[in-house]
Amino acid sequence: MSKIIGIDYGLVRTGIAITDSARIVASPLQTVPTKELSAFLEKLFLKEKIEVVVIGEARYLNGEQSEITVAQQKFADGLKKKYPLLLIERINEAFTSQEAARSLITMGMKKSDRQNKSNLDMVSAALILRYYLDKI
């Protein structure tokens, strides 16, 4: 069975998460500089059988788009154009950063490691992917 990836897209860094082949477990994979994201995904798509990409959608609490929402949509549109056979899904990423921070504490991660935003981005991507898996 194919895998699903989750993306916590940011202007500077992007967190990536991936499921297992059974699509049950969402695991943090890596955080990459956003400027290197296309090359990273191209290699990942060659290595893994990916059919679905879930991209977080940041919105204000009132539902309005934020500045990053526009960049996320532009990224999603570009991905769909480059890989037309991929299913691109968007999911609300509200509060994933706060939940990711709590998860890092629960896992017993040292404070210095928790302050590394790369770790937070990976866990946020895994949460975005988990929300999607719970929905399907």
Image: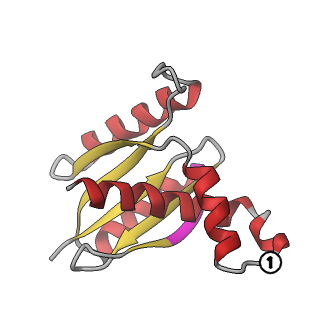
Label 1 neighbour load within 10 Å: few <14, some 14-19, many 20+: few
Secondary structure found at label 1: loop
Tell me residue 99's x, y (percent).
59, 56
* Depth order, front residue of 79/88: 88
Residue 94 against residue 25 in the figure, above or below = above
* Depth order, front residue of 71/84: 71
Q: Who's the residue at 49% across and 22% down the image?
A: 65
Quadrant of the image for the N terminus? bottom left
Which residue of the protein is positioned furthest toward the right in this rendering? 112
Q: Is residue 34 magenta?
A: yes
* Depth order, front residue of 18/104: 104
Q: Who's the residue at 58% across and 49% down the image?
A: 35
Tell me residue 34's x, y (percent).
58, 50
Q: Who's the residue at 25% across and 73% down the image?
A: 23
Residue 91 against residue 68 in the figure, above or below = below
Instruction: Give, as a single range, the part of the protein colored magenta.
Output: 29-35
- Picture mark count: 1
Residue 41 against residue 111 in the figure, above or below = above
Tell me residue 96's x, y (percent).
54, 51
Residue 33 shows in the view: no
Q: Which residue in the structure is indicated by mark 1? A: 110
* Three-letter residue code for mark 1: Lys
Residue 5 is drawn in which quadrant?
Answer: bottom left
Q: Who's the residue at 20% across and 56% down the image?
A: 136
Q: Is residue 122 left or right of residue 51?
A: right
Residue 49 is drawn in which quadrant?
Answer: bottom left
Residue 41 is drawn in which quadrant?
Answer: bottom left
Q: Main secondary structure of the magenta part?
A: strand
Tell me residue 79's x, y (percent).
33, 45
